Image (tube, rainbow, N blue to C red):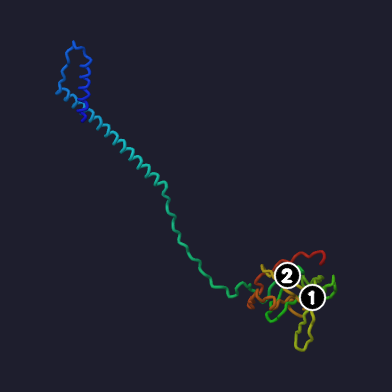
Amino acid sequence: MFKQIICIAAIATALGGCATTNDKNAPIPVDATALEASLTKQETKLIAAINQCDEAQSAGFAALTAKIDDLNAKVADINVKPEPAVVPVVAPVQCPPSPIGDKFMLGAVEHVYIDEVKASFETRIDTGAESSSLDARNIILFERDGSQWVRFDVFTQGKQQPAKTFESKVERFVRIKQDAEDKSDRRPVIHAHLEIGEYKAETDLNLSDRSHLEYPLLLGRKFMQDIAVVDVGQTFIHGKKQDAKPSKENK
């Protein structure tokens, strides 16, 4: 087909030349064999050039494809994140529940600090007694602003030092009967804030003369109920709080 197109073009050119050539000039004869050989040679060169161009393009595409594949591999290596190491979780050992629950332990004798008198006392923790009692002397009842108050002395530094006088509002009165044959003892009750080691609590204390008893302060069942248990085999589990400096009013 390519040969036919070239032949047609050559013939057309020859005919045109003949038409424009002066009749005085004789027409140049066309050698078909030579023309075909020339066209074949040109066709061979063109095909070789085209094939060479195709090979060069194919080699370029192959090199470009190789570079793209290499870049994709590098990008994939960058984007791949290492899987986190699996750390085994050790389940905590379940301790058995405490037999005393949220309650704290008290020994048979403890140092108890009373904020109202700013002093610590060696205290008998007595599960046999119902109420709690503080050793007080010179107990005098009086009225203030329509309420019952009490003035009393306490040996905050021991019996070898002078007692100090305090005043407090009376919460109520209780009757305590020591023995079956004794008459009941009517005592004023005050509200007090206590500290035993790191523990703080509130309770009511009845005031009475405990000079005949070993400990100036006694804590009974009402104080311990729902907050503490007693180990009678131990004493002074919680240590002693330092007494506060006395105020000018209590000197």
Amino acid at the residue labelled 2: His
Q: Tell me the residue at 50%/66% (across/down).
A: 92
Identify residue for label 2. 193
Measuring from the top left, give residue 131's x and y in whole percent. 72, 79
Mark before the other along the chain sequence, 2 or 1:
1
Q: Quadrant of the N terminus?
A: top left
Distance Cα–Cα, label 2 vs label 1: 17 Å
- Vertical placement of residue 178 versus 191, above or below: below
Q: Specify the quadrant of the image occupied by residue 149.
A: bottom right
Q: Tell me the residue at 73%/70% (across/down).
A: 193
Say the numbered circle drawn on residue 58. none
Amino acid at the residue labelled 1: Ala
Q: Residues within 10 Å of mark 1 (few under 14, many from 20)?
A: many
The furthest residue to the bottom:
181
Q: Tell me the residue at 41%/49% (across/down).
A: 80
> Quick check: marks 2 and 1 in contact, CB under 8 Å?
no
Q: Is residue 141 left or right of residue 126?
A: right
Measuring from the top left, give residue 231's x and y in whole percent. 63, 77
Measuring from the top left, give residue 174's x and y in whole percent. 77, 80
Identify residue for label 1. 136
Label 1, secondary structure: give it.
Answer: loop
Q: Residues within 10 Å of mark 2 (few under 14, many from 20)?
A: some
- Vertical placement of residue 232 versus 26, above or below: below
Q: Is residue 239 left or right of residue 28?
A: right
